Amino acid sequence: MALTLASRRRSRRLAADIGLLVVAAAFALPLAWVLLSSVDPHADLRVKAPDGVTWSNFDAILTSDITFTPLLNSLILCGGGTLLTVVCAALAAYPLSRFRSRLNRPFLLTVLFATSLPITAIMVPVYALFVQVDLIDTMQGTILFFAASQLPFAIWLMKNFMDGVPKELEEAAWTDGASSMQSLVRIVLPLMGPGLAVVTVFSFVLMWGNFFVPFMLLLTPDQMPASVSINEFFGNRGMVAYGQLAAFSIVYSTPVILLYVLISRRLGSGFALGGAVKG
């Protein structure tokens, strides 16, 4: 009886390990294709060892028109949108976290509902509005819409992180004459570093990979970000420059990876405030 139970446990564990390996392979194979195809002179859709290592794919894409200008546009759009999102989310989440009101719960539920609205459902009225207010084909207009689309979930995340900062720390600052804005900037935000890091990474990554919004709101080719210019590698009649596409994908992913590496320490840290309000 015990032997049968042990064999069942081993079978379940083996099945779980196989399932995890399948999931890992599903993530690893596309990454392997990108890395191998970027140095393959005859790259195609197959995951295979390169026929011969070449850097011609990188030489072909590392130009101002193909890579550098679109990446700069992406950094301006996503950096500006992320900064605006984080600032507005902090200012909106602070009263929701620190002050009790009957409107808090309805407002948070409305914010949560707004996160479920698909971008495609609101792009037509947004496009018409941007035409009326002369924001179409402008970087600032796209930054505003990026921030507006990410703000609901950013507020929800920021509020949850602010709840973890003891209010007693702010009350001590208020006793010394600090205002609510000063306590937010000098006490709450520095102590919720992991929360700021999460909101920053979450917002930046979603904006960085967004194709539809800049494709609809920007018309001038010189203003297109990298998420839209990557479409240039897909030619007519099914012709695709797979090697250059893979090389561009590596370069395109680098800023996001660097951002994560720079703030990974913040993501790994927590709120060490257990004894901050004692005594």
Image: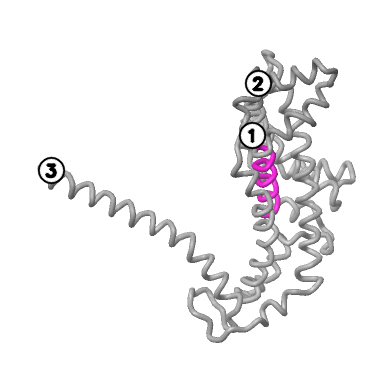
Q: Nearer the viewer's eye, disc 1 or disc 3?
A: 3
Q: Distance between the residues labelled 1 and 3?
A: 48 Å
Q: Which quadrant, please, contains the C terminus?
A: top right
Q: Which amino acid does label 3 sit on?
A: Ala
What residue is shown at x 81% (from left), y 22% (from top)?
180
Q: Name the residue under label 2.
A: 277
What residue is shown at x 52% (from left), y 73% (from top)?
45
Which circle marks residue 157 in the picture? Answer: 1
Farthest residue in the right direction? 134
CB contact under 8 Å: marks 2 and 3: no
Which circle marks residue 185 in the picture? Answer: none
Q: Distance between the residues labelled 2 and 3?
A: 53 Å
Residue 152 placement, left or right of 6: right
Is 205 magenta? The answer is: yes
Q: How is the image coloured?
A: one colour
Sequence-wise first label, 2 or 3? 3
Query: In the rendering, at what x and y percent does residue 81 appear?
Result: 77, 46
Q: What element carries label 2?
A: loop
Q: Which amino acid does label 2 sit on?
A: Val
Q: Mark 3 points at which residue?
A: 2
Residue 130 placement, left or right of 150: right
Q: In this view of the protein, which residue sits in the foreground, 117 or 194?
A: 194
Q: How far apart are marks 1 and 2 (CA)?
A: 24 Å
Q: What residue type is labelled 1?
A: Leu
Residue stretch in magenta: 195-210
Circle 2 residues within 10 Å: few <14, some 14–19, many ≥20: few
What residue is shown at x 78% (from left), y 36% (from top)?
87
